[in-house]
Image: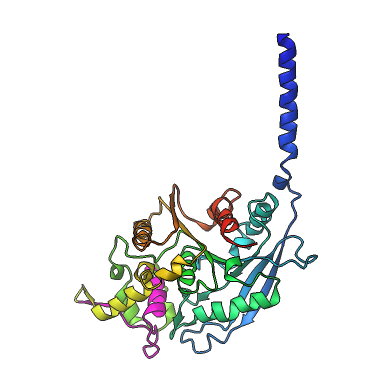
Amino acid sequence: MLATSKQVLRTLAVFFLLGVLSARPAFSADIAKGQLVDREIQSKNFTQSKIGVSPVRRLAVYLPAGYDGSQKRYPVIYFLPSPFDNFRAIFDSMGAQAVLDRAIADGTIGKFLFVTVDMTTPLGSSWYVNSSATGNWEDFMVQELVPYVDANFRTLPTRDSRGIAGHFMGGYGAIRFGMKYPQIFGSVYALHPVGTGSGVKVLASLPNFELMEQAKTLDDVRKDGYSTIFTSIFQAHIPNPDKPPLYFDFPAHRVAGELVIDAKVMDRLRENFFLESLIGKYADNLKSLRGLKFDWARSDSNWDHVYSNHALTHKLNEYGIVHEAEEYNGTWGGEANWSAEGRVRTDLLPFFQEHLVF
């Protein structure tokens, strides 16, 4: 009797295992594959740029499997990659297409369009704002890019079916667009955003002001990493088109080795740049979003990023803005996000499945 029971249990275990294996087609190599379409937009928003921003902006659009043979319309996720990477790098070297294909095949998310676009200046990040130095990046996004995608692809052209996401500086841009344009983007997810607020270090202590003040061309500031990044920040948020070659007002100077702050310019910078400075102004917009989430890596070697994201979620709570904020164990990085079990697949795409209208 005991032997017979064991045989029955073994048989049931075999059938169970076979059933589990047969129920996992989404993880095979035969999943339906989407396609990637490259396009260009000749923009009107960069003709007055002082630093040589090209008016030709390139984008890549992921279309899900079956798109060509259907008349169905789809929600859209706009993605702002880190400006340290080429805008196509997530597809060319990080495996993004396979991740999106797999997520759709296994039911993590319904079929959707995914758009990534070059939003960089010659120095890196545009910071996604209208600037008299670099051009009108907000206007490009909401007046040109989104209408172009809606006109040329079968989208569900409403804010309820349109999300925006980004990584690092792109995460900053995603939150900023959600703050200012909730009628365009109904859901927002930021992967490890920066520029969210004050960090541990004093803002003006990072760039090399002597180097920037002596610069004759943009190439001169490229000699120092922080100076390159902060020149892009200053060009975006405290621009001055009448001050070549860098085209911004200096928030600080070195005088006899001492850092002297220009309080009025610094105030302009903080009020225009930091996301936490904008919360009060755009609180009602943020409350109207269908979903808002951001995350950050606990082991980021730059503690400013960790500290400022802690502060951002606290301030959002003070204004009663519903959101999700998650600190995860590890370090940040594009390739880690786009791995088979990275945060795009495990967190970002399920978030949009919940908050977008399909």
Query: Quick check: can you spot residue 267?
Result: yes
Quarter of the image containing the N terminus? Answer: top right
Q: Residue at x 38, y 54 (%)?
A: 301
Quarter-of-image position of residue 211: bottom left
Residue 142's place in the image compared with 332, above or below, is: below
For residue 251, what is the image quadrant? bottom left
Residue 326, position as x, y percentages in the image: 44, 52
Question: Residue 271's spot in the image, x, y percent?
Answer: 33, 75
Q: Is residue 221 something one can see in this rendering?
A: no
**Residue 88 versus residue 30 in the image, above or below:** below
Most foreground residue, 11 or 213: 11
Q: Which residue is pictured at 58% across the width and 67% down the height?
A: 160
- The residue shown at (59%, 52%) is 345
Q: Is residue 97 left or right of residue 329?
A: right
Q: Is residue 74 above or below residue 324?
A: below
Q: Split into 4 quadrants, where in the image is the C terminus? A: bottom right
Q: Residue furthest right?
A: 69
Q: Picture coordinates of residue 220 (x, y %)?
A: 40, 78
**Which residues fall within the magenta stretch?**
226-255
Coordinates of residue 93 in the picture (x, y in percent): 61, 59
